[in-house]
Amino acid sequence: MAVDDGKLHEFVNKALGDIAGTLTAGLVVVGERLGLYRALAAGGPMTPAELAKRTGTVERYVREWLAAQAAAEYIAYDAASGRYHLPPEQAVALTDDASPFCVLGGFIAMTSALGVAPKLVDRFRTGKGIGWDEHEAGLFEGTERFFRAGYTAFLVNAWIPALEGVEEKLQRGARVADVGCGHGASTIVMAKAFPRSTFIGFDYHGPSIEVARHRATEAGVADRVTFERAAAKEFPGTGYDVVAFFDCLHDMGDPVGAARHVRAALAADGTWLLVEPFANDRVEDNLNPVGRLFYSASTFVCTPASLAQEVGLALGAQAGETRLRDVLTQAGFTRVRRAAETPFNLVLDVRP
Ligand SMILES: C[S@@+](CC[C@H](N)C(=O)[O-])C[C@H]1O[C@@H](n2cnc3c(N)ncnc32)[C@H](O)[C@@H]1O
């Protein structure tokens, strides 16, 4: 087929943007680790020398970083004064961890995930998996930071009220298991909002459980929140009023087995709050920026994580509601309702 020159140029420009974007992602992490964004946000317009002095860094490196960031439109440059500044919108996205618009965690998580690229090439040939535990710690920290702001914004204000009768139960005092809890961001958000309820977070990844315990102490909720290492098919306890899974069912090797275990662990009138990445059912309906992010993260992290476990169903991060319903029905759940959604999350109210 003949090559269309215009289309070739258009595609190569896009690809060059992506190559530059890969490097920008790495430089965002450098800026975050060194406090460069925070110093700019606090101090206003600065020359490279001024920013270097404030942050205890070397001017030559900072000068190059600032120019790269200005070319990427992450930082603004005023040629007349030779000073750089962080526009207020970028300051939110690059310094305010509490904002749902903060993107730092995403950069930290995904640049860390890139570290498995050589292994992943091998796994494409063998079909074996890459466990969550085989990644760099930045993936765990970045996931926590990227998701926590969304949980803070939506979990208590929108998702829980959208579940039938759950908010009242939590207010009165309920027992909640948060499975695949990672660093416990969601567990702690719920515990702060519902002081009469008790929460237990489970994850099969020991180091994440250690961090979660530390976070509960820091947040002053350790009296009502505990964290234990356990796989989703084996977590202890029965009669839970609520079992919650946040963005982890699709990472599991045997989601049907995990769902069966949830069914057995729930009280007869209990609720499974199942939060999964937003996705439409058909690939063609996910070919957009959110789908690009999730399919890519899924190739690096979620799909290999599932393939590293028993069964290895590998739902992927873009399974969509129909496929999820199929898993839940196989496990014996009869009532599944989409309670809420955001551009990034599907929130299902699942009952025995
Ligand atoms: C994308 S992270 C989400 C973490 C946390 N729920 C959050 O929203 O921040 C997926 C989590 O699932 C956990 N996980 C994966 N397979 C698991 C299994 N079979 N049993 C328990 N946890 C599992 C991982 O260790 C990881 O912490």
Image: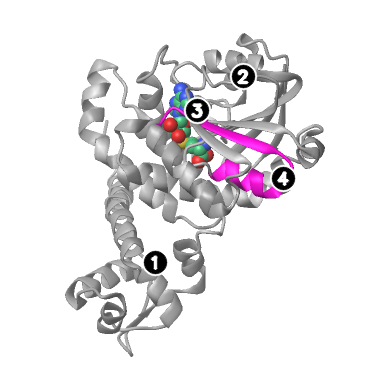
Q: Amino acid at mark 3?
A: Val
Using residue 111 as the reference point, say whether residue 333 is left or right of it: right
Q: Amino acid at mark 1?
A: Tyr
The residue stretch that appears in magenta: 185-205
Badge 4 or badge 1: first in the primary sequence: 1
Is mark 2 in CB contact (under 8 Å) with mark 3?
no
Name the residue that disc number 1 marks.
74
Using residue 227 as the reference point, say whether residue 312 is left or right of it: left
Would residue 304 be visible to someone looking at this image?
yes
Q: Nearer the viewer, mark 2 or mark 4?
A: 4
Badge 2 or badge 3: first in the primary sequence: 2
Mark 4 is surrounded, within 10 Å at the Cα level, by few (under 14), some (14 to 19) or many (20 or more) other residues, namely many
Residue in the foreground of this view, choosing between 318 and 57: 57
Mark 1 is surrounded, within 10 Å at the Cα level, by few (under 14), some (14 to 19) or many (20 or more) other residues, namely many
Name the residue that disc number 4 marks.
194
Is 190 contained in the magenta span?
Answer: yes
Residue in the foreground of this view, choosing between 40 and 286: 40
Would residue 251 be visible to someone looking at this image?
no
Is mark 1 in CB contact (under 8 Å) with mark 2?
no
When asked about the image quadrant of residue 350, the answer is top right
Using residue 275 as the reference point, say whether residue 92 is left or right of it: left
Residue 283: mark? 3
Residue 102 sits above or below residue 269 on the image: below
Callout 3: SS: helix
